[in-house]
Image (cartoon, helix red, strand yellow):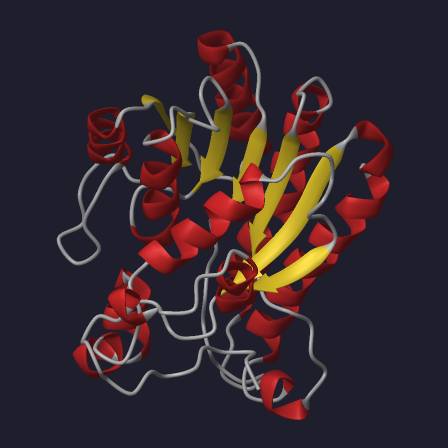
Amino acid sequence: MPFNNKTVFISGGSRGIGKAIALKLAASGANIVIAAKSVEENPVLGGTIFSAAKEIEAAGGKALAVQTDIRDEEQIINAVAKAVESFGGIDIVINNASAIQLTNTENTAAKRFDLMHDINVRGTFLLVQHCLPYLKKSTNAHILTLSPPISLIAKWLSPHIAYTMSKYNMSMMALAWAEEFRNDGIASNALWPLTTIDTAAVRNLLGGKALAEMSRTPAIIADAAYYILSKQNLSYTGNTFIDEQVLANEGITDLEKYAVISGATLYKDLFIS
């Protein structure tokens, strides 16, 4: 039970990858703070902070559901205070909340540009900033940011520069924090999938059922996150990991169980050359 009594603060963890990570860590005894917006179920997206909390507790962890829009600094401050009040501190921050729109410069409205930067960049920054005093008190603190390796290859820049900038900014923060907080004993890494992951975003925004069936389940990200966050003494910090790389480091190379459709040809995710 490597996460017994550890408190994990996850942004946007009511469904998909965030919830999968929460359930994985809860099964090892973690206290999970679900800080997300959904309090009423959207029939298309599914899941709320309360349904996620029930699943976390059923998996063996303790859960705190706090309605939080990380665009609002006061809501972040409130969620952090409730986490500390409930569990006594914060050991791990997972920056999972993110907005996506794959449009070029001409077709990206200002409000969509602002949404991606307010959530992906500003919200991520402020969440870590307000959790930092408690991370510094932890005996094995981690920050894990769901963002890609930084590549300046034109095909990742020109089709959707607004989204790309926001995600690369998340990775830049992850790398910066590894060095900035090294003397505080806080590890910071980024994590990204090699293939597309079967989430509501893939099914409803990006490629529908066809792409979902060429994807892996969120469990592969959850397992990779588990291994990263299990590491002690800054042995993993300052990395932009790919999920397969993390699992290979643990001797896990048979990944067939993660495929949505066994034997299907898998589709590589964005930012993977």
As drawn, the residue found furthest toward the left would be 43
Q: Nearer the viewer, residue 266 or 87?
A: 266
Residue 178 locus on image (x, y percent): 77, 46
Q: Nearer the viewer, residue 38 or 243?
A: 243
> Is 42 placed above or below 258 here?
above
Task: Please identify the quarter of the rendering in which residue 67 is found.
Answer: top left
Question: Image quadrant for the C terminus?
Answer: bottom right
Task: Please identify the quarter of the rendering in which residue 269 is found.
Answer: bottom left
As drawn, the residue found furthest toward the front would be 251
Question: Image quadrant for the N terminus?
Answer: top left
Looking at the image, which residue is at 46% across and 37% down?
10
Residue 49 locus on image (x, y percent): 29, 34
Residue 262 locus on image (x, y percent): 19, 76
Residue 76 visible in the snapshot: yes
Looking at the image, which residue is at 86% across and 32% down?
183
**Horizontal side of residue 43 vs 45, given as left or right:** left
> Is 191 placed above or below 266 here?
above
> Is 121 placed above or below 264 here?
above
Looking at the image, which residue is at 32% across and 65% down?
201
> Is 68 placed above or below 171 here?
above
Q: Nearer the viewer, residue 49 or 141?
A: 141
Residue 96 visible in the snapshot: no
Q: Nearer the viewer, residue 235 or 105?
A: 235
